[in-house]
Image (tube, grey):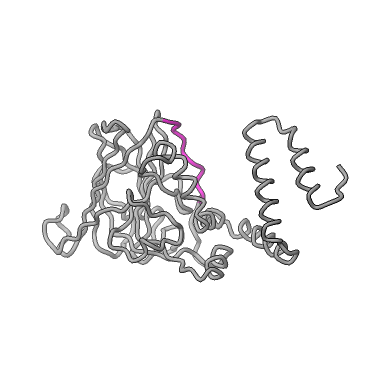
Amino acid sequence: MIIETQQDVTTAVLAEMQRTPDARSKQILDALVRHLHGFVREVKLTEREFQEAVRQIARLGQMTTASHNEVMLIMGALGVSNLVCLLNNGAGGTQPTQANNLGPFWREGSPPMANGDTLLRSPTGGDPLFFNGQVRDAAGAPVAGAEVDVWHSSPVGLYENQDTEQAEMNLRGRLTTDTQGRFSFRSVKPGAYPVPIEGPTGDLLKAQQRHNWRPAHLHFLIFKPGYKTIASQVYSNDDQYLQTDSQFGVTKALIGNYVRHAGGGAPASDVQGAWYSLEHGFTIEPGEARLPKAPISGKVQKAA
């Protein structure tokens, strides 16, 4: 088709896409072109703005490394990650769900642990945290033998892949639910943390005068054949950023009751001062058991 007007561009692209053999691919790409072209027309995108957009998109890829995923980060900052999550869980987005964003910091290969073991693999300051969880199906029955991957940031706001001072796989572990669907571990209470702002995500937040903080939380990835794999986050009920999470991830179903104990009575004899306990349940639905592709694969290296 010879292009004569700006309207012809959209018509021509959509016409060429009609040969796409896969129906779902055709549906997605057709909608992408219509909405993308409509966006350009609605805002009357200038050439300078287009060139800047291309530069920023290129930077997303350039800044994504083995230890950092800038693309996943900006998807959260735009609210896309949680929107996709909520549309695909909780009975098709009609009910509350324990599913949440996978986030940009999950790594494959977390060390297997026995229930009750610690996630600490190097000295890590902070108040001790003792977690007890249970996985149930949609009917409320316990799910035994589910694999639960756990990870979280340190109290100073760094995941081990960002921090050369933390041991490999610190604050990460993989557990299996018992016959009652229960699992447990010891760690330290995570703190709120700032998402990295050196790339396009930071430029976006600054342009909108938004802060870059996330409320403190624990991450979970629950896998069991016969059930839809879910990622989850359990947020600290006392965190100042619950209402303004820079990644739009907080839902009511995921605010945990982190209980502070002033001292004494801890499940471990070496804990003398203040400590926290947390109990939280997870519901998983029938569906495809599929582990996602990890957004990162390694850890930052110390400068030579």
* Front position in the image: 63 or 77: 77
Q: Is residue 31 left or right of residue 106?
A: right
Residue 275, position as x, y percentages in the image: 20, 60
Residue 160, position as x, y percentages in the image: 41, 58
Quadrant of the image containing the C terminus: bottom right
Q: Is residue 262 left or right of residue 143?
A: left
Q: Quadrant of residue 26?
A: top right
Q: Is residue 42 left or right of residue 262?
A: right
Q: Looking at the image, can residue 193 be seen?
A: yes
Against 41, is 282 above or below?
A: above
295 is within the stretch colored magenta? yes
Q: Is residue 119 left or right of residue 39?
A: left
Q: Residue at x 76, y 43 (%)?
A: 13
Q: Decide whether the magenta segment is chiefly helix, strand or loop.
A: loop
40 is within the stretch colored magenta? no
Against 293, is 104 above or below?
A: below
Q: Residue at x 68, y 40 (%)?
A: 30
Residue 6, position as x, y percentages in the image: 80, 52
Q: Magenta segment range?
A: 287-297
Q: Looking at the image, can residue 304 be seen?
A: no
* Front position in the image: 180 or 240: 240
